[in-house]
Every structure is written in C-alpha cells, then in structure tokens.
Image (cartoon, grey):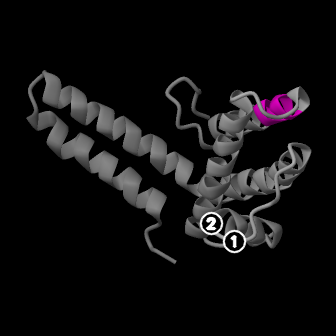
Amino acid sequence: MLNPSLDELLAGMADGLAATVLPELAPGPARDELLAAIALTRRVARAVPRLGPYLHTDTADLADTLPRLWAAVGLDEPADGPVADALALARSLPPETPPPATELAAADLALRDAAADLSAQLAAGTGPVDVAAELRALLERLAAREAAELRLSPWVPLR
C-alpha cells in the first residue's frame, strides 16, 4: 500500500500549489488556470477512495443488464474479446474484495462501449421499444451513480 495514499498525494499537491505557486501569479489567465487545476485536483482526491466501490457496482450493473438486452434484440453475447473478458470479470466479482481499480476500470469501459454500440443500433431503428427504454434506464443509472458516488461534476455539491 502506498504511504501516503493517492488521495493524500493529490490533496498535498493541491495544497502545495495553492501555498507556493498561486501567490506568485498575478491576476490573469495563468492564475485562473491554476485555480481551476487546484480545484479539480482536490475534487479528484476526494473521489479516489470511492472509485473501487463505484466501479464494482457499475460493472456489475452493466454485466447484469446488457446480456438481457442483447437477448431481447436477438444478439448473441460476445464469446471473446474485451467485452467477453469484461463480462467474465464482472460475473466473478467477489462482493467484499473487488479486484484492483485498473481491472475494474477496463471492464467498466469495455461494457460501456458495448452499451454505446447497442444504443447506436437501437437509434438506427432496430430492436423493440422496451429494450430502448431499458437501455435508457441503464444509461441514466450510470450517469446518476457517477454523479452521486464520485461527485466529480461541478454541479454536484460536495459532502
């Protein structure tokens, strides 16, 4: 385990920039950019501890929902490749100790790409309306979970 942790390193970097570099900059675009970078770094530092549980839930939701939607539109589940690997990982997720965030992130992104592909197919007019509604509900859950769990959006209040 890293000591200090990644979130502590990011918070320390933001504090250091605010304490040492920011006072040296005159008002203007460079100072504004640094202020934005400091705020973003602090926001990411607060999100890092929640990343693993967020990815665990997100990946499991995608792996549970996508196969049902594929079956409903007459598509076979991928047998190999990144989406098949992501499904296999998601189906083997232990509830207490998730795999490293890098593995979960790769699986989550592969499944999100598969959801985007399905969305594009449905937008082209193929597939039943109820599948489109369930896919839309999945995408809304993904966006809401991201906003609620990671709180990276500047429009979501920090707690």
- Quarter holding the C terminus is top right
Tell me the kind of residue under disc 1: Asp
- Which of 16 and 114 lies nearest the eye of the viewer? 114
Number of residues whose C-alpha sits closer than 10 Å to that of mark 1, classed few (under 14), some (14–19) or many (20 or more): few
Q: Which residue is mark 2?
A: 82
Residues at marks 1 and 2 touching, judged by CB atoms closer than 8 Å: no
Answer with the quarter of the image where residue 60 lies.
Answer: bottom right
Queried whether the magenta region covers residue 134, the answer comes back as yes
Which residue shows up at 60% across the image and 54% down it?
109
- Which of 135 and 145 lies nearest the eye of the viewer? 135
Left/right placement of residue 118 relative to residue 12 reads right
Instruction: Check residue 90 in the rendering and tell me which mark sits there, or answer none.
Output: none
Left/right placement of residue 30 relative to residue 3 reads left
Tell me the kind of residue under disc 2: Pro
Q: What x and y, as percent, mark residue 101?
A: 59, 65
Main SS class of the magenta portion in the image: helix
User: Visible in this render: residue 109?
Assistant: yes
Left/right placement of residue 36 relative to residue 62 reads left
Answer with the quarter of the image where residue 25 lies.
Answer: top left
Please say if 46 is above or below 30.
below
Q: Which residue is mark 1?
A: 80
- Which of 95 and 90 lies nearest the eye of the viewer? 90
Q: Which dot, 1 or 2, sits closer to the camera?
A: 1
User: Visible in this render: residue 98?
Assistant: no
Where does the magenta region start and end? 131-137
Queried whether the magenta region covers residue 89, the answer comes back as no
> Secondary structure under badge 1?
loop
Q: What x and y, as percent, mark residue 46?
A: 52, 47
Q: What x and y, as percent, mark residue 51?
A: 60, 55
> Secondary structure under badge 2?
helix
